[in-house]
Amino acid sequence: MKIGIIGSGVVAQTLGAGLVEQGHDVVLGTRDPQKLDEKKNFAGTLREWLVKVQNKAKIVTFPEAAAHGEVLINATSGTISLEALKLAGADKVGSKILIDTANELDFSKGMPPRALASQDNCLAEKIQAAFPNLKVVKSMNTLSALVMTNPKGLHGGDHTLFVSGNDAEAKATVTSLWKSFGWSDVLDLGDVSASRGPEMYMGMWIRLWGATQTGTLNIKVVR
């Protein structure tokens, strides 16, 4: 599939590389595609990333990424996601799937950051309301990039990934993408309002990261 990723940090680079490896036609959207040598937080430069994927992907603008993808991925920082999607013209691309991987985090008081999600503040719901043409699927926000495309590298893959969204076919498409990475336990939580739970879980994930001193961790829903 053609996949347009809005964002160019570590999550975008990780998912992008994994999707390229699976044979998808991937572009990464960034504010200024000419700045290939600018260091990213927790990620290498985009020029280094292009070498890693053997130049099988492209770096483009936000609007070009949104126009390119049959499936879009929001891999921006959650506090700027709505702005980035507006810049991308996400309201003008038709009824595409948008996978929202972002979390709203407040770093103003230093580390660890504060998770801003609540029953009354859910990023996926805000994106769906702002862009009703899109089929928003919340997923991958409960993990670090270390686990996203290599689930079997942690406990043999015996752990759980979540999807939430209003459109059943969109969730099935996203689940199929994740299964290509080796995910075997993908749990559908329900409509987009169910995204509140995974977003609020980020507060717990941050504390687990601190307690274990590793981002290579996840949870398993035993049922």
Image: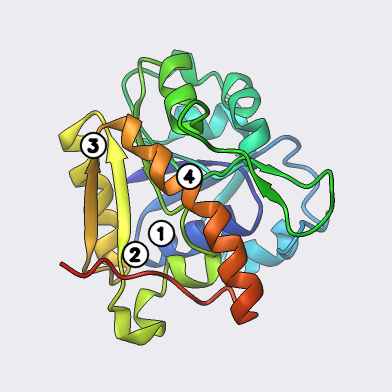
Look at the numbered discs 4 and 3 and tell me whether their residues touch, using CB distance below 8 Å: no
Q: Are there few (<14), some (14-19), or many (20+) residues within 10 Å of tag 2?
A: few
Q: Residue 203 at what x, y percent from top left?
A: 57, 53
Indicate which label's residue lies in the foreground, 4 or 3. 4
Q: Secondary structure at mark 3?
A: helix
Q: Quadrant of residue 223?
A: bottom left
Q: Is residue 176 left or right of residue 2?
A: left
Q: Residue at 34% across / 64% down in the picture? A: 22
**Residue on which disc 2 sits:** 22
Please state which of the two labelled residues, at mark 1 or mark 3, is closer to the viewer.
Answer: 3
Residue at numbered disc 1: 19
Q: Amino acid at mark 3?
A: Ala
Q: CA distance from mark 2 to mark 1?
A: 5 Å
Q: Nearer the viewer, residue 41 or 62?
A: 41
* Residues under numbered marks 2 and 1 in contact, where contact means CB atoms less than 8 Å apart: yes
Q: Residue at x 61, y 43 (%)?
A: 7
Q: Classify 10 Å Cα crowding around label 3: few (below 14), some (14-19), many (20 and above).
A: many
The amino acid sitting under disc 1 is Leu
Q: Position of residue 179 (x, y in %)?
A: 24, 63
Mark 3 → mark 2, Cα distance in angstroms = 19 Å
Left or right for 162, reference 143: left
Kindly indicate whether the residue at mark 2 contacts the one at mark 4 (C-beta within 8 angstroms): no
Precedes in sequence: disc 4 or disc 2 = 2
Please name the residue shown 58% across and 24% down the image: 88
Q: Please name the residue that numbered disc 3 is placed on.
A: 170
Report crowding for label 1: few under 14, some 14 to 19, many 20 or more residues within 10 A (C-alpha).
many
Q: Secondary structure at mark 4?
A: helix
Q: Label 4 crowding class (10 Å Cα cut-off): few <14, some 14-19, many 20+? A: many
Q: Of callouts 4 and 1, which one flags the residue occurring earlier in the amino acid sequence? A: 1
Q: Which mark is residue 199?
A: 4
